[in-house]
Amino acid sequence: MRQIVAAEAGSCGVQLYFHEGETFRLEQEVFEPFVLLSAEAEVPQNCTVKMLAGNGFFCRQAFFSSFEEYSKLLPELKKAPGVMVLRDNLQQALSMKSLRLFGDMDFTALRRMQFCIRGDDNGIENIEISDTSGFTAVYSGGEKEVIQSFIDRINGFDPDVLESFNGCRHDLPLLVKRAKKLKIVLSCGRDGGTFTMRQSRYAAGEKQYSYQRFSLAGRHVVDILHPVQLYDAAHRDLEELDLPSLQEYFQIEGSFVPQIIGRLSEILLPAYFYRTRELPLGFQECILRGSGSALDALLTAEYLCKGYSIPLPETPRPYAGALSNMEVAGVFHNVRHCDVRSLYPSLLLMFDTAPVRDEAGVFLSLLAKLRTFRLAAKDRARTLPDGVEKSQQEALQSSFKILINSFYGYLGFSQGAFNDFALAEKITAAGRELLGKLVKTLQEKGAVVIEMDTDGIYFQMPENSGEELETALNDILPPGIQLEFDAEYPAMFSYKAKNYALLTGDGAIKLTGAALKSRALEGFQRKFIRQLVSARLHDDPESGREAYENWRSAISNRETALEELAKSEVLSDSPENYRKKLASGSTRRSAPYELALASNKEYRAGDKVKFYVTGTKAKLPVVGNAKLLDDADPGNRDENIAYYLAKLDALYETFA
């Protein structure tokens, strides 16, 4: 299998990069860009047309003889009726050539470099770097020499991946700006070229992020903040997304920022690396594309390689969702969690039913293959001792799990060429029915069902029950569906649906849900909630009362750090756009935007605004009664004591 470490597609064809000793080898192949056409669509000039099999709407593939001709016509083609454009050139090339990045490489085989640039618009003070050879450096001194040393190290070490934290917003824009000012060519690409940039967006859960995307020929430019945001959207465990908080959460030791970034990458990137091995996409694209879009790229590639036409997506329609609700509230002891392994993908395979427009029979065969690979990797990981190989197998099975689970969600993906809302509804209903049977059996056996999510159940074990209960539950399951009892907890606090706390066997407390740990809460609120929840889990109301009195005293006497009282909000829009929307009446006044507009600092979309509330009344509008944390005078405290005490009282009444 070809171990391609990077690839580019464009006017020079397809450029494939391979490791060769401590540098790289370049291979070049022909690239014929293409568009897909309906039966009625007009064929672009100077194209070779291939007829595609099947009844899909896009039944012809038009190849261009030159990339220049394709690029010239692209703006018109995007708007033309009956034309489908795969806008990612690399996706086109990898799809048609059945190529994938990284081959059978392990993540540890990548050459990776981490960097942190310190400075501002007036100049770069220093650049800190580390890499997978163990090399570290801090380049300081004259700004020109600092930047040139950074360029030289990139070209000398020849990394496949450049990693930073918040680099797309701070480090790289600053580097490009200062290099331009100093007339330094940032020749960091494997072709000797410099960075290219474009505005882009991606989604992490329900949040949309705008960012400046940086690319470098032959290398992958990764801002590790992006997988952090994706991790947060999936797990909702992170209280803050800054490096010190992440270092504490992931238990990363050390103080040298590039090495912290490198350790974060080792934790978060392997799943995306192994995903890239399966998909016709670049590494950065695999990180930032949603699972539905990524699977659509894979299915489209399989179809085109088989010479099959591509259908139009079905029109979206509503259907009943998966079973997910809270049964009871309060504190429960001796709690177990059972999980139906890959419930919905397993139901798809059990029913042996593919999407209605999957004429080539690709959907289920891919799902079955990936499921087999995942189980094999999981079994290998289980038998291996702790170490690098075990970590690799765990990352591999985790990557396959994400891909496998996306098959079910893809059925209801509005932009998926092979979506099938009727099948999604059928599989969802079967999942609800199966989970309903499990709940009924648990209750009949004396268990207290506390909370259900998409494919798992939290419940309080009945007394004197163990293997008998597990046997009764497994007897309900159809062939091919497996139940895992994957966790035990001494106590659980259930507040409301999808908001609960778990006490682990080693005494740690895991909070789930925005009501318990949202970053929209002030710091003191998050800490106080954790103290109250801990008191509930340990049946210790006195410690909750003590925490309440301590906070009340500290706030009343202005002894609480203002940082704890401040709220952090990320600007989803630029202050200037906010001003325009406000003038047109399309938005309401907002404290963080008003503060940003009034500040001497230049704020942009994506920047964080930290502010606290001033005044004397417990109930008052925050707009007009807020101050930037940076503008606070430690010697003349002016936070609104009544406002913060009212918040404290409300929390105590809710959770004590």
Image: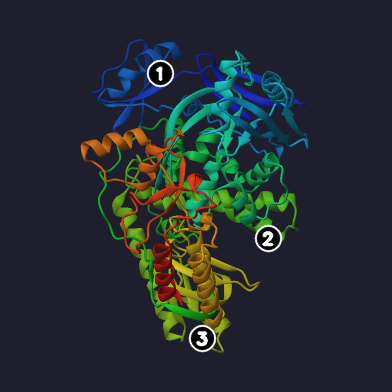
Mark before the other along the chain sequence, 2 or 3: 2
Pick the residue in front: 132 or 126.
126
How far is the residue under mark 3 from the one under mark 1?
A: 66 Å
Identify the mark nearer the N-term, 2 or 1. Answer: 1
Residue occupying image coordinates x 58% and y 41%: 224
Q: Position of residue 427 (x, y in %)?
A: 36, 59
Residue under the point 30% across and 40% down: 313
Mark sitting on residue 382: 2
x and y percentages locating residue 258 in the rendered image? 68, 39
Going by the numbered disc 1, the residue's amino acid type is Phe
Could you tell me if residue 83 is visible in this image? yes
Query: Does 278 sit left or right of 41 as displayed?
Result: right
Image-based side of 451 in relation to 171, left or right: left
Task: From the image, tell me which residue sits under label 3.
Answer: 462
Relative side of 250 to 481, left or right: right
Query: What secondary structure is marked by label 3?
Result: loop
Residue 63 got which mark? 1
Residue at the front extreme, as displayed: 636
Local secondary structure at mark 2: helix
Q: Residues within 10 Å of mark 1 (few under 14, many from 20)?
A: many
**Pick the front one: 346 or 548:** 548
Disc with the residue nearer the chain's start (3 vs 1)? 1
Is the N terminus in the top left, top right, bottom left or bottom right quadrant? top right
Residue lying at the far left of the rendered structure: 585
Residue 314, located in which quarter of the rendered image? Answer: top left
